[in-house]
Amino acid sequence: MMRAHTWSSRPVSGTTPGASAWTELEINCLKTMCAFMNADGGDLVIRVSDDRSVVGLDHDYRTLPKPNRDGFENYMINQVSKIGDLFLRYVRFRFYEVDGVEVCRVSVQSS
Protein backbone atom coordinates (compact mmCIF):
# COMPACT_ATOMS: atom_id res chain seq x y z
CA MET A 1 0.00 0.00 0.00
CA MET A 2 1.45 3.35 -1.08
CA ARG A 3 1.28 6.15 1.46
CA ALA A 4 1.27 9.85 0.83
CA HIS A 5 2.34 12.59 3.19
CA THR A 6 2.68 16.32 2.75
CA TRP A 7 5.03 18.56 4.64
CA SER A 8 5.15 22.29 4.93
CA SER A 9 7.05 24.17 7.58
CA ARG A 10 8.03 27.73 8.12
CA PRO A 11 11.79 28.26 8.42
CA VAL A 12 13.04 28.98 11.89
CA SER A 13 13.34 32.76 12.24
CA GLY A 14 16.67 34.35 13.03
CA THR A 15 18.72 31.56 11.51
CA THR A 16 21.48 31.68 8.96
CA PRO A 17 20.17 31.02 5.43
CA GLY A 18 21.12 27.60 4.13
CA ALA A 19 22.11 26.37 7.59
CA SER A 20 19.75 25.76 10.47
CA ALA A 21 16.77 27.41 8.74
CA TRP A 22 16.21 23.98 7.23
CA THR A 23 16.53 21.95 10.40
CA GLU A 24 12.84 21.32 11.11
CA LEU A 25 12.04 20.61 7.46
CA GLU A 26 15.09 18.35 7.02
CA ILE A 27 14.39 16.29 10.10
CA ASN A 28 10.74 15.77 9.28
CA CYS A 29 11.40 15.00 5.61
CA LEU A 30 14.15 12.52 6.45
CA LYS A 31 12.02 10.84 9.11
CA THR A 32 9.17 10.48 6.64
CA MET A 33 11.46 9.13 3.91
CA CYS A 34 12.96 6.60 6.34
CA ALA A 35 9.48 5.54 7.45
CA PHE A 36 8.45 5.01 3.82
CA MET A 37 11.62 2.98 3.13
CA ASN A 38 10.89 0.83 6.19
CA ALA A 39 7.28 0.30 5.10
CA ASP A 40 5.73 -0.04 1.65
CA GLY A 41 7.13 3.17 0.17
CA GLY A 42 5.19 6.36 -0.44
CA ASP A 43 5.23 9.93 -1.67
CA LEU A 44 6.21 13.02 0.27
CA VAL A 45 5.12 16.38 -1.14
CA ILE A 46 7.29 19.18 0.23
CA ARG A 47 5.71 22.60 0.73
CA VAL A 48 2.09 21.49 0.43
CA SER A 49 0.38 21.40 3.81
CA ASP A 50 -1.85 18.60 5.09
CA ASP A 51 -4.89 20.76 4.30
CA ARG A 52 -3.55 20.94 0.71
CA SER A 53 -2.69 24.62 0.77
CA VAL A 54 0.34 25.27 -1.40
CA VAL A 55 3.25 27.12 0.18
CA GLY A 56 5.87 26.57 -2.51
CA LEU A 57 9.65 26.35 -2.43
CA ASP A 58 10.50 29.98 -3.25
CA HIS A 59 11.70 30.87 0.26
CA ASP A 60 13.70 27.66 0.48
CA TYR A 61 15.39 28.36 -2.84
CA ARG A 62 16.57 31.75 -1.57
CA THR A 63 18.36 30.11 1.38
CA LEU A 64 20.58 27.99 -0.87
CA PRO A 65 23.89 28.83 -2.57
CA LYS A 66 22.29 27.73 -5.86
CA PRO A 67 18.79 29.25 -5.44
CA ASN A 68 16.71 27.04 -7.73
CA ARG A 69 15.24 23.56 -8.04
CA ASP A 70 18.62 22.03 -8.91
CA GLY A 71 20.14 23.53 -5.76
CA PHE A 72 17.22 22.23 -3.70
CA GLU A 73 17.50 18.74 -5.17
CA ASN A 74 21.26 18.68 -4.57
CA TYR A 75 20.71 19.83 -1.00
CA MET A 76 18.11 17.14 -0.34
CA ILE A 77 20.31 14.45 -1.93
CA ASN A 78 23.10 15.51 0.44
CA GLN A 79 20.71 15.19 3.37
CA VAL A 80 19.69 11.67 2.35
CA SER A 81 23.40 10.82 1.93
CA LYS A 82 23.92 11.66 5.59
CA ILE A 83 21.90 8.58 6.54
CA GLY A 84 23.73 6.55 3.88
CA ASP A 85 24.47 6.77 0.16
CA LEU A 86 22.92 3.35 -0.35
CA PHE A 87 19.48 4.86 0.37
CA LEU A 88 19.66 7.27 -2.58
CA ARG A 89 18.52 4.52 -4.95
CA TYR A 90 15.15 4.42 -3.15
CA VAL A 91 14.45 8.15 -3.49
CA ARG A 92 13.42 10.19 -6.54
CA PHE A 93 12.76 13.93 -6.58
CA ARG A 94 10.31 15.58 -8.99
CA PHE A 95 9.18 19.18 -9.17
CA TYR A 96 5.78 20.50 -10.16
CA GLU A 97 4.24 23.93 -10.52
CA VAL A 98 1.04 24.25 -8.50
CA ASP A 99 -0.87 27.52 -8.19
CA GLY A 100 2.08 29.39 -9.68
CA VAL A 101 4.74 28.05 -7.27
CA GLU A 102 6.98 24.98 -7.27
CA VAL A 103 6.63 22.05 -4.91
CA CYS A 104 8.75 18.93 -4.63
CA ARG A 105 7.38 15.39 -4.75
CA VAL A 106 9.71 12.80 -3.25
CA SER A 107 8.85 9.27 -4.34
CA VAL A 108 10.28 6.74 -1.93
CA GLN A 109 10.47 3.02 -2.59
CA SER A 110 10.48 0.38 0.10
CA SER A 111 13.98 -0.75 0.97
Image: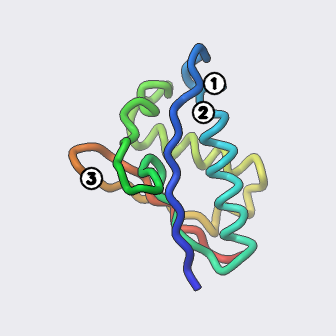
Given residues 78 and 53, the one toward you in this image is 53
Write down the residue under mark 2.
Answer: 22
In the image shown, does 51 or 25 lie closer to the viewer?
51
Q: Which residue is drawn at 42% across and 25% down?
A: 62
To which residue does mark 1 refer?
Answer: 19
Name the spot of residue 52 as percent of width and height, x first.
Answer: 38, 56
Q: Quadrant of residue 2?
A: bottom right
| Residue shown at the point (58%, 86%) measured from the top left | 1
- Given residues 99 and 82, the one toward you in this image is 99
Distance from Cα at disc 3 to Cα at disc 1? 27 Å
For the residues bearing labels 3 and 1, Cβ distance under 8 angstroms: no
Q: What element carries label 2?
A: helix
Q: In this view, does 39 lie to the left or right of 21?
A: right
Residue 63 location in percent, x, y?
A: 49, 25
Q: Residue 86 placed where, x, y %?
A: 74, 63
Which residue lies under the disc numbered 3?
A: 98
Distance, label 2 to label 3, CA atoms, is: 22 Å
Query: Which quarter of the figure has residue 75?
Result: top right
Q: Is residue 83 left or right of residue 4?
A: right
Disc 1 and disc 2 in contact, CB within 8 angstroms: yes
Q: Which amino acid does label 1 sit on?
A: Ala
User: Residue drawn at (64%, 44%), measured in percent from left and top?
Assistant: 78
- Circle 2/circle 3 CB separation < 8 Å: no
Disc 1 to disc 2, C-alpha distance: 6 Å
